[in-house]
Amino acid sequence: MNLDKLPKLSNTPPRADAIPETDVPRFGGHDHPSASLALRGSSIADTWIALVIGVIFLLMGGRFASWGMAEITGKPFHSGMIWTGGEKAGQEISYWEIANAAAFSDMTLFSTGIALLVAAGAWLVMGWQHIGPPAAVIAILSLTTAVVLNGMTVARIGQGALVSMLAIALLGYEIIMLIQTWRSRRA
């Protein structure tokens, strides 16, 4: 900020230890304390946001995790629903046959939670020289995958996929913030 254009209110001489404005690095410079503090503050907030919302999405898609564990261990997974009519009357409905693509929706919610937890980990290590950039790339790829899955859910279910629409907005925000922070730390 150029103070020369403001009206002079006193005849106070300039301080001898004052830093000329041209020597102060801009936002993104690592040696300026306020810039690094601002970057640390945003990454701490983004870490907590990604962590908390990621856990919420994991809990919302927990049924998919239960199905996955049953598949891995070879145990049967019971959906708890029975066909009431047709040639399958009286039989249990498999998880992937439940109406409104419930299994696909659960998979999307669970993958969104995983992507947000990966992003939270990337936020934690973003400042480390050797680990930060690869972690950011992995987080951006996992977030992008979750955006694609949420987009497929919205296309498949339609307006009923409100949570997936909100997840796309949140994931997009996380991607943009990771890219901007990564670029500012490289500068």
Image: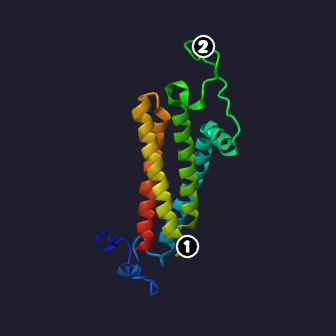
Contact check, label 2 and label 1, Cβ < 8 Å: no
Q: Is residue 63 above or below residue 137?
A: above
Residue projecting furthest to the front: 87
* Residue 97 % position (x, y): 54, 27
**Which one is closest to the eye, mark 2 or mark 1?**
2
Relative to 101, 63 lies left or right: right
The label shown at residue 163 is: none
The residue at 47%/76% (across/down) is: 30
Choose between 17 and 123: the one closer to the eye: 123
Q: Secondary structure at mark 2?
A: loop
Q: Which residue appears at 68% of the width and 40% of the height?
A: 70
Residue at the left extreme of this rendering: 5
Q: Secondary structure at mark 1?
A: loop
Above or below for 96 versus 34: above
Work out whether residue 54 or residue 40 is closer to the camera in this orientation and state it. Answer: 54
In the rendering, at what x and y percent does residue 114 appear? 57, 50
Viewer can see residue 169: no
Q: Quadrant of residue 21?
A: bottom left
Looking at this rendering, what residue extends furthest in the top direction?
85
Which amino acid, mark 2?
Thr
Query: Residue at label 1?
Result: 128
- Within the image, what quadrant is residue 177 found in? bottom left
Residue type for callout 1: Trp
The residue pinned by badge 2 equals: 84
Q: Position of residue 133 (x, y in %)?
A: 48, 69
Q: Position of residue 55 (x, y in %)?
A: 62, 46
